[in-house]
Image: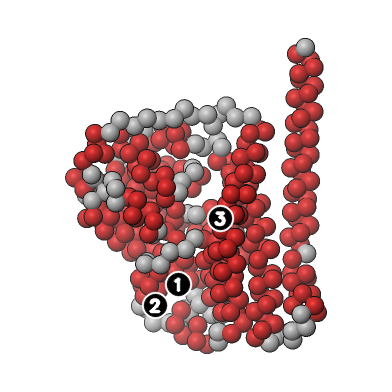
Amino acid sequence: MNTTSEVLHTHTNGRLWGAVILAAIAWLLLYNIIQPLSEWISYEAVGLARGSHAGEAVAFFFYDVPKILLLLAGMIFAITVLRTFFSAERARQLLSGKRVGIGNVLASALGIVTPFCSCSAVPLFIGFVETGIPLGVTFSFLIAAPVINEVALVLLYGMFGWKVAVLYVTSGMTIAIITGLCIGRLGLERWVEDFVWQMQFQGSEDESGKLAWEERIARGREAVRDIVQKVWLYVLIGIGIGAVIHGYVPTDAMAAYMGKDAPWWSVPLVVLVALPLYSNAAGMAPILLALVEKGAALGTALAFMMAIVGVSLPETILLRRVLKPPLIALFISIVTVAIIITGYLFNLIL
């Protein structure tokens, strides 16, 4: 009986991994035909002239839409499977008892791989505080999770290469660590709503180590479907805006206001303009690419994107349920300054 079950299990695993391998091969084939296909559509099927404003804009659109959606599908699947090994409950357990400094570094690293979104900010915050995790360590986690956005990481890697992606992760972790250390050293527990200290956190069972590969891969497929359904419209809008910038905005004009030779105040200006706005990384990444291609400095453009994505209005509103206004204001101020510094550093290095 056991032998029969083992044979069936092995057969199921073989089919499962066979399907994963075939999907990976299909992904690679599709990714490699995007550029020639986009050029054929723009210049042959539609009949636009190469080098014209309309031709460049349309080619940009038909190239970036499938490219970004394929990058999202492939990398979100891989990241989600990885995340099944790092549940939010496990993150809470790992951070509990860690001293300040080491805890901030570990919290910022866990924030990258642990499932987190604005809707989970309040219960996670309460759970961390209740289990004795220092306030500054908690903020390192809460900052790293949205600032180092997996969608932005995937798209930056696909558009600019691994060096920019690594710099993005490094700068995001540095922001999270420094902000957490600053908030922790200031002793701001009095600016946390009183009811938070009185609540008893009910942690869910950590099942991340018990999942079979079938379940992990199933969760990866579900994440791809859910995320693509949520962001495809933002992708189209973002690429549409990027296409207009790419095709019609003069390079000299963009370089004058956001280029490396632009005035020193260009970085803080674009960050301050971005703060009240709200979008996700999927919609901002193609705009970022178009800005850079038109002469904007990468650091200035990246600071603009990080301010829109990292200082999220929905997250701020939700955190108001557990934080008093002075702490929220300080949190936004520190993150804003850190993003501005990051923009300057990127412009200096790249």
- At which x and y percent is residue 45? 80, 77
- Discs 1, 3 touching: Cβ within 8 Å: no
Task: Tell me which numbered mark, 1 or 3, is placed earlier along the sequence.
Answer: 3
Query: Is the residue 154 above or below the residue 108 in the image?
Result: below
Kind of residue indicated by mark 2? Ser
> Which residue is at 59% across, 85% downward?
248
Among the two numbered marks 1 and 2 on one chain, the one whose residue lies closer to the N terminus: 2
Q: Between marks 1 and 3, how big is the CA–CA gap?
A: 27 Å
Seen as rendered, the residue at the extreme left is 190
Please tell me how crowded label 2 is: few (under 14), some (14-19), or many (20+) other residues with Cα within 10 Å. some
What residue sits 44% from the left and 56% below the top? 147
Label 1, on which residue? 300
Left or right? Give the position of 70 relative to 303: right
Query: How many marks overall?
Result: 3
Identified by mark 3, the residue type is Lys
Q: CA distance from mark 2 to mark 3?
A: 32 Å
Q: Which residue is mark 2?
A: 266
What's the amino acid at mark 1? Thr
Q: Which residue is mark 3?
A: 230
The secondary element bearing badge 2 is classed as: helix
Residue 173 percent location from the top left of the image = 43, 52
Contact, mark 1 vs mark 2 (Cβ under 8 Å): yes
